[in-house]
């Protein structure tokens, strides 16, 4: 069975490599426009960001991004389903897809209990919640691709059945291969890969652990990593060297390109490079160093 026409078009628009970043989430719109325009000029195919209830609104921010650029695809990685009614999400996403045809991908996710409950809501039955949310979206415009944040088999299968693919996060290439096995060949598979352009193991792992320590407090990620063969000794604190090296690619640009190729070889359509750094300038610097080896 051939992939739906809009999935094929999205795959072509995305190209091989995009960018995931929360570096400008709290920055003024001017800083957001500057970074996204810089990412586009370097040749990356897309730019994605996350959403936390009460912190940012991905639809408003990505309208700013799309208006500041000419070609690049913007993706929500993810739009938090606890943040708004599904009808509101459909209307906002449809507006962006209509205003910038072929340049917007709606990624939806159930987020995590600590973040959701901090906003005053009760987190429960995430798989059923996503099913209900997809029902609430109703019929979607033909030019609006939808992917789900999915890690484990049931959510991956829901994405295969009800969406256009998945956006995965905090995963090694081994998970990408497993996800492709569930999705089959006709759905989009878009993993995020954290990276650090740094050749010192001590420096790179120190930066990486500032990233991993947060996610290792979230059961969704921890349970998924257990399924991939990591154990308590790997998952304690900010993670073992084995875990850090599996989740964060570091080294020379060529070293990082090898990890991106591993995801592609495992079945990824489009890999989102997520530079870890302390500022938008540091993010941009790493993307500039990576562009010659990652982009055609």
Image (cartoon, grey):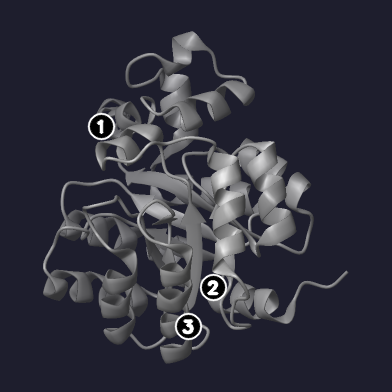
The residue shown at (31%, 28%) is: 205
- Is residue 34 shown to the viewer in this render? yes
The residue shown at (56%, 50%) is: 130
The disc placed on residue 210 is 1
Q: What residue would you read off at disc 3?
A: 97
**Is residue 258 found left or right of 3 in the rendered image?**
left
Quadrant placement of the N terminus = bottom right
Q: Nearer the viewer, residue 98 or 127?
A: 127
Residue 194 position, x and y percent, is 40, 45
Which sits earlier in the primary sequence, circle 3 or circle 1? 3
Quadrant of the rendered image containing residue 206: top left
Observer-side mark, 3 or 2, equals 3
Observer-side mark, 3 or 1, equals 3
Residue 91 position, x and y percent, is 44, 77
Q: What residue would you read off at disc 2?
A: 14
Residue 139 position, x and y percent, is 63, 75
Q: Residues within 10 Å of mark 3 (few under 14, many from 20)?
A: many
Q: Residues within 10 Å of mark 2 (few under 14, many from 20)?
A: many
Between marks 3 and 2, how big is the CA–CA gap?
Answer: 15 Å
Quadrant of the rendered image containing residue 89: bottom left
**SS for callout 1:** helix
Quadrant of the rendered image containing residue 93: bottom left
Q: Nearer the viewer, residue 238 or 97?
A: 97
The disc placed on residue 187 is none
**SS for callout 3:** helix
């Amino acid at each position: 069975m051939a992939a739906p026409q809009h999935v094929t078009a999205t795959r072509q628009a995305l190209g091989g490599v995009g960018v995931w970043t929360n570096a400008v989430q709290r920055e003024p719109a001017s800083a957001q426009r500057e970074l996204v325009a810089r990412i586009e000029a370097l040749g990356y195919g897309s730019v994605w960001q996350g959403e936390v209830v009460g912190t940012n609104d991905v639809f408003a921010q990505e309208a700013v991004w799309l208006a500041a650029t000419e070609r690049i695809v913007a993706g929500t990685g993810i739009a938090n389903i606890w943040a708004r009614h599904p009808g509101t999400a459909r209307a906002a996403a449809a507006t962006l897809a209509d205003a910038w045809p072929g340049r917007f991908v709606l990624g939806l996710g159930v987020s995590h209990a600590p973040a959701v409950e901090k906003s005053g809501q009760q987190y429960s039955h995430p798989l059923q919640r996503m099913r209900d949310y997809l029902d609430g979206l109703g019929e979607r415009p033909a030019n609006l691709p939808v992917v789900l944040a999915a890690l484990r088999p049931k959510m991956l299968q829901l994405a295969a059945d009800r969406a256009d693919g998945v956006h995965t996060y905090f995963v090694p290439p081994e998970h990408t291969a497993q996800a492709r096995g569930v999705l089959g060949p006709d759905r989009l598979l878009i993993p995020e890969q954290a990276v650090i352009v740094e050749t010192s193991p001590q420096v790179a792992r120190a930066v990486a652990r500032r990233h991993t320590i947060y996610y290792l407090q979230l059961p969704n990620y921890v349970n998924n990593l257990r399924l991939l063969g990591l154990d308590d000794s790997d998952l304690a604190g900010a993670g073992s060297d084995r875990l850090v090296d599996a989740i964060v690619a570091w080294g020379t640009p060529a070293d990082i390109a090898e990890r991106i190729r591993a995801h592609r070889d495992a079945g990824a359509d489009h890999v989102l490079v997520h530079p870890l750094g302390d500022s938008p300038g540091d993010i941009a610097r790493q993307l500039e160093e990576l562009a010659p080896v990652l982009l055609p």
